[in-house]
Image: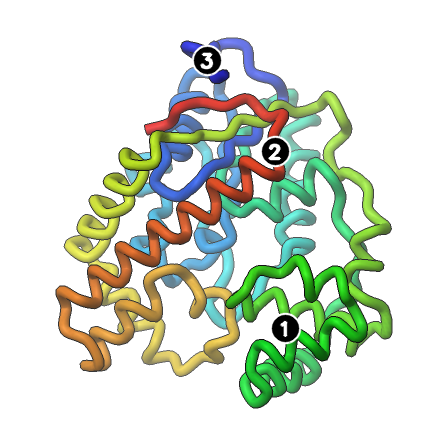
Amino acid sequence: MPPASLDLSKPPLVTLIAGPTASGKSALALKMARETGAVIINADSQQLYADLRILTARPSPEDEAQAEHRLYGVADAAEAWSVGQWSRAALTILDELRTENRPAVLVGGTGLYFAALTRGLADIPPVPPAVRDQIEADYLAQGEAAFRARLADVDPQAAQSIEVGDRQRLVRAMSVHSASGRSLTDWKARTRPLLEPGSWTGLVLEPDRAVLYANCDRRVDTMVETGALTEVRRLIARNLSPALPALKAVGVRELAAYTSGDLEREPAVAALKQATRNYAKRQLTWFRNQTPDWLRLPGA
């Protein structure tokens, strides 16, 4: 059961704040930073990209002025940051803060980032772009069922565990095998935690489901009213590969359908609200299954 309150006056050196989108993670991190002098470090894969500040609900300039924020908007949409790249950047910052005896709050909704820190990160060699592009083309040509069956021949555990419709992870698993000759599952078995056990505390925000979904809908309305459509237009105009992470951010596909004339505004916004709620639900499920021993808080 979550505690009635959280004492922010005596934080551990490293606090991890996880949870679904629109659950109040950023507000809690900012409160902790104001009261303790902690540095806030982004642990959300979508908020890494500078092109989509509004659509990814990055902290506002006003919030950033109240506490030091790191790893927000540091990547261009043409880049493809991996879990490993983010982990190396985060650990570099944590090492700097440790020498200064300053606390850190890592906050975000990307479960794999937290898993890398607390359970380990496989030292997987980079996949050449040509290999990734060919595997992506194979997926599109073969379809998910046939591609998954092909993956099962070389990495049965990945083929079984990756959720239906998760093209990115299916392509990633096959790409790693094609490039390295070893399965992604095999690489992941050789892991170690990046943070020392006992050096961190983990918190998960779990709002009531109805409250969370209402927050998601309100957030979408605010995004649309404050410039998300312009952001998406600018991103699409760059003609970048649709396989890039920034192009897969929640809301890009739905709003691009409106800006291109394929959907009217109202159904496009409704589709974005549904996609956001679905995303929040997946995050809730992931954190419930993968972080059962973390402290639970009700959130927003």
At a point 42% along the width and 62% down the height, the residue shown is 249
Amino acid carrying label 1: it is: Val
How many numbered discs sit on the rendered protein?
3
Res 171 label: 1
At a point 37% along the width and 47% down the height, the residue shown is 58
- Residue pointed to by mark 3: 6
- For residue 190, above or below residue 153: above
Q: Secondary structure at mark 2?
A: loop
Res. 65 visible in picture: no
Of pointers 1 and 2, the one earlier in the residue sequence: 1
Q: Residues within 10 Å of mark 1 (few under 14, many from 20)?
A: many
Residue with the most extreme bottom position: 141
Of pointers 3 and 1, the one earlier in the residue sequence: 3
Res. 186 visible in picture: yes
Q: What separation in Å lies between label 2 and label 3 (alpha carbons)?
A: 18 Å
Res 291 label: 2
Q: What separation in Å lies between label 1 and label 2 (alpha carbons)?
A: 26 Å
Rendered location of residue 87, percent (x, y): 66, 47
- For residue 1, above or below residue 287: above
Q: Quadrant of the C terminus?
A: top left
Q: Residues within 10 Å of mark 3 (few under 14, many from 20)?
A: few
Locate residue 246 relative to residue 89 in the image: left or right: left
Locate residue 264 relative to residue 292 in the image: left or right: left
Disc nearest the viewer among 2 and 3? 2
211 or 92, nearer to the observer: 211
Q: What separation in Å lies between label 3 and label 1 (alpha carbons)?
A: 41 Å
Callouts 3 and 1 close, C-beta under 8 Å: no
Amino acid carrying label 3: it is: Leu
Callouts 2 and 3 close, C-beta under 8 Å: no
At a point 71% along the width and 62% down the height, the residue shown is 158
Of pointers 2 and 3, the one earlier in the residue sequence: 3
Rendered location of residue 251, percent (x, y): 33, 62
